[in-house]
């Protein structure tokens, strides 16, 4: 009986497919590892932020809230004077006058020094 050469278990096409499948599997594993690292980083960041928030609250480093604006109605003549002399907006002039209880001198001093 003629002897046949042993059959190659993998043809070149199958070998190429296997190599591509292994490469794809390797790439998928790298992407999965990257995503898992990012998730861990996100979790660590959230933990760090919550830790900072709890520490900030106990040491008084919380953001300051704006005090409510006084309900003083600004004098129209004072507003016009400040707008004309200091060249600021009417809105800013009214706000500054409210903060200083309609005191023109204190308002102007504040606006000049800040």
Image (cartoon, rainbow, N blue to C red):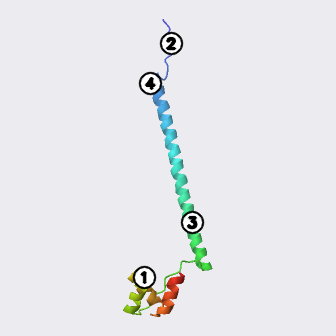
Position of residue 44 relative to residue 75, above or below, is: above
Mark 2 vs mark 4: which is more N-terminal?
A: 2
Residues at marks 2 and 4, CA–CA distance in whole angstroms: 19 Å
Residue 89 occupies which quadrant of the picture? Answer: bottom left
Q: Secondary structure at mark 1?
A: helix
Residue that badge 4 annotates: 13
Residue that badge 2 annotates: 5
- Asked whether, in this view, residue 19 is left or right of residue 51, the answer is left
- Residue at 52% over, 86% down: 110
Q: Secondary structure at mark 4?
A: helix
Mark 1 vs mark 3: which is more N-terminal?
A: 3
Q: Which mark is residue 31?
A: none
- Asked whether, in this view, residue 18 is left or right of residue 80, the answer is right
Residue that badge 1 annotates: 92
Residue 69 on image: x %, y %: 44, 88
Residue that badge 3 annotates: 47
Mark 1 vs mark 2: which is more N-terminal?
A: 2
Count of numbered circles on the image: 4
- Residue at 49% over, 39% down: 25
Is 2 in front, or is 73?
73
| Front disc: 1 or 2 | 1
Residues at marks 3 and 2, CA–CA distance in whole angstroms: 65 Å
Kindly tell me whether residue 81 is visible in this rendering. Answer: yes
Mark 3 vs mark 2: which is more N-terminal?
A: 2
Is 90 in front, or is 35?
90
Q: Secondary structure at mark 2?
A: loop
Residue 112 on image: x %, y %: 51, 83
Residues at marks 1 and 2, CA–CA distance in whole angstroms: 96 Å
């Amino acid at each position: 009986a003629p002897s046949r050469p042993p059959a190659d278990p993998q043809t070149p096409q199958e070998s190429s497919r296997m190599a591509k499948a292994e490469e794809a599997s390797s790439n998928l594993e790298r992407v999965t590892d990257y995503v898992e690292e990012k998730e861990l980083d996100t979790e660590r960041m959230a933990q760090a932020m919550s830790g900072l928030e709890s520490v900030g609250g106990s040491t008084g480093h919380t953001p300051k809230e704006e005090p409510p604006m006084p309900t003083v109605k600004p004098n129209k003549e004072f507003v016009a004077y400040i707008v004309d002399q200091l060249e600021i907006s009417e809105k800013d002039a009214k706000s500054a006058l409210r903060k200083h209880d309609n005191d023109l001198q204190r308002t102007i001093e504040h606006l000049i020094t800040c």
